[in-house]
Amino acid sequence: MGLKEQLMADYKTAMKEHDVTTKETVNLVRAAIKQREVDQKVVLEDDADIIPIIKKQLKMRRDALADFERAGRTDLLDGYNKEIEVLERYLPEELSEEAVLAAIEKIADEEGIERNMKSMGVMMKTVMSKLRGQADGSLISKMVREYLSK
């Protein structure tokens, strides 16, 4: 079952079980997917196309958490934390720092990329294309910098 079908099934289950947080969170993700389909005039069936939409929703909530903490809005923190938990269920396990570093070393060897900071752009482009959806971009950037600066 693909992510799109899983989201629909979970939405129905949440409705039956009166799980308001899951229902609303899944519904917002489904709406974001539908909006992307309408905007781009395509049908998103591949999980690789849906994962970035879920990650964007997750990032929006994590950014809001920091704002709520600064504003002292603890009443909103719990709800957003629950929504984050719901969204994380749909994302694949991300690579660890060690796994990303190993992948970077392997890619550099395969592509023959020199180990200096001048290679940052080429390295980032290559690594991001190969690790798409498997690791966070900021983590990849940090690890590429670390690898190239050694």
Image: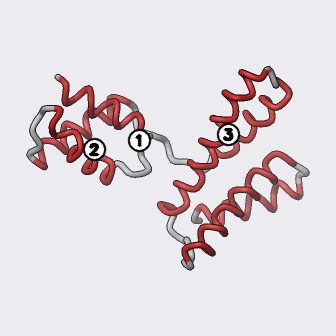
Instruction: Name the side, left or right, on which 7 lies relative to 43.
Output: right
Label 2 sits on residue:
124
**Front residue (pair 93, 32):** 32
Q: Is residue 61 left or right of residue 101?
A: right
Marked residue nearer the N-terminal end (2 or 3):
3
Q: Mark 2: few, some, or many residues within 10 Å (few <14, many ≥20)?
A: some
Residue 111 appears at what percent x and percent y?
12, 49
Residue at (70, 62) in percent of width and height: 30
Residues packed near mark 3 inside 10 Å, few (<14), some (14 to 19) or many (20 plus) = some
Amino acid bearing label 2: Met
Quarter location, residue 135: top left
Is label 3 in a helix, a strand or a loop? helix
User: Eyeballing the image, is 100 above or below 129?
Assistant: above
Three-letter residue code for mark 1: Gly
- Label 2 to label 3, Cα distance in Å? 26 Å
Name the residue: 12% across, 48% down. Answer: 110
Identify residue for label 3.
61
Q: Which residue is mark 1?
A: 137
Which labelled disc corresponds to residue 129?
A: none
The disc, 3 or 1, on the residue closer to the chain's N-terminal end is: 3
Image position, residue 114 (x, y; %)? 9, 38
Is 101 rendered above or below residue 107?
A: above
| First-in-chain label (2 vs 1) | 2
- Taking 22 as reference, is 132 left or right? left
Is residue 77 at least partly visible in the picture?
A: yes
Q: Is residue 70 left or right of residue 53?
A: right
Q: Nearer the viewer, residue 134 or 71?
A: 71
Q: Position of residue 113 (x, y in %)?
A: 12, 43
Q: Work out whether 61 lies above or below 75.
A: below
